Amino acid sequence: PLTFDKPILLLCEGQSDQMILNRLLDRFLPSHSFQVIFVGGNGAFANSISLWKQTSDSFNENVRTILILSDKDDDADSSFKLIADALR
């Protein structure tokens, strides 16, 4: 199971996004408080957050801030709505 051990959760769509973000954070903010996780696409943000809220004690105890990095795909308004719904 996934363990959440940092107060800032940075969610991104793909594994390559996760690798780049981790390298940038480690290089420019070596003592950062971010945990970077990829969810597999912007449609998966809401399901992932909902699942973690219901099943993960470490998520509920440790995560204080969620940042979401997503591209707009073809429809910026639709992408924004998906992310906004994920945070409700």
Image (cartoon, rainbow, N blue to C red):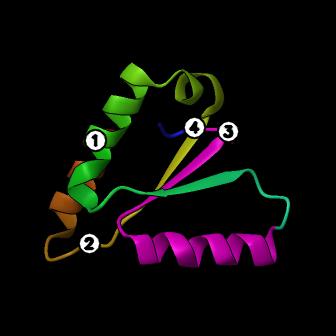
Mark found first going from the N terminus, 2 or 3: 3
What is the C-alpha distance between the residues marked 3 and 1? 20 Å
Q: Estimate how packed mark 4 is, as few (under 14), some (14 to 19) or many (20 or more) residues with alpha carbons within 10 Å.
A: few
Find disc 1 in the rendering and name its residue: 46
Which quadrant would the C terminus be assigned to in this image? top left
What is the C-alpha distance between the residues marked 3 and 4? 6 Å
Percent position of residue 49, x then y: 37, 37
Label 1: element kind: helix
Q: Nearer the viewer, residue 71 or 24?
A: 24
Q: Nearer the viewer, residue 67 or 13?
A: 13
Find disc 3 in the rendering and name its residue: 5
Residue drawn at the location 22% of the way across and 61% of the way down = 79
What is the C-alpha distance between the residues marked 1 and 4? 18 Å
Q: Is residue 69 above or below residue 82?
A: below
Mark found first going from the N terminus, 1 or 4: 4
Q: Which residues are magenta?
A: 3-29
Q: Nearer the viewer, residue 57 or 10?
A: 57
| Three-letter residue code for mark 4 | Thr
What is the C-alpha distance between the residues marked 4 and 2? 29 Å
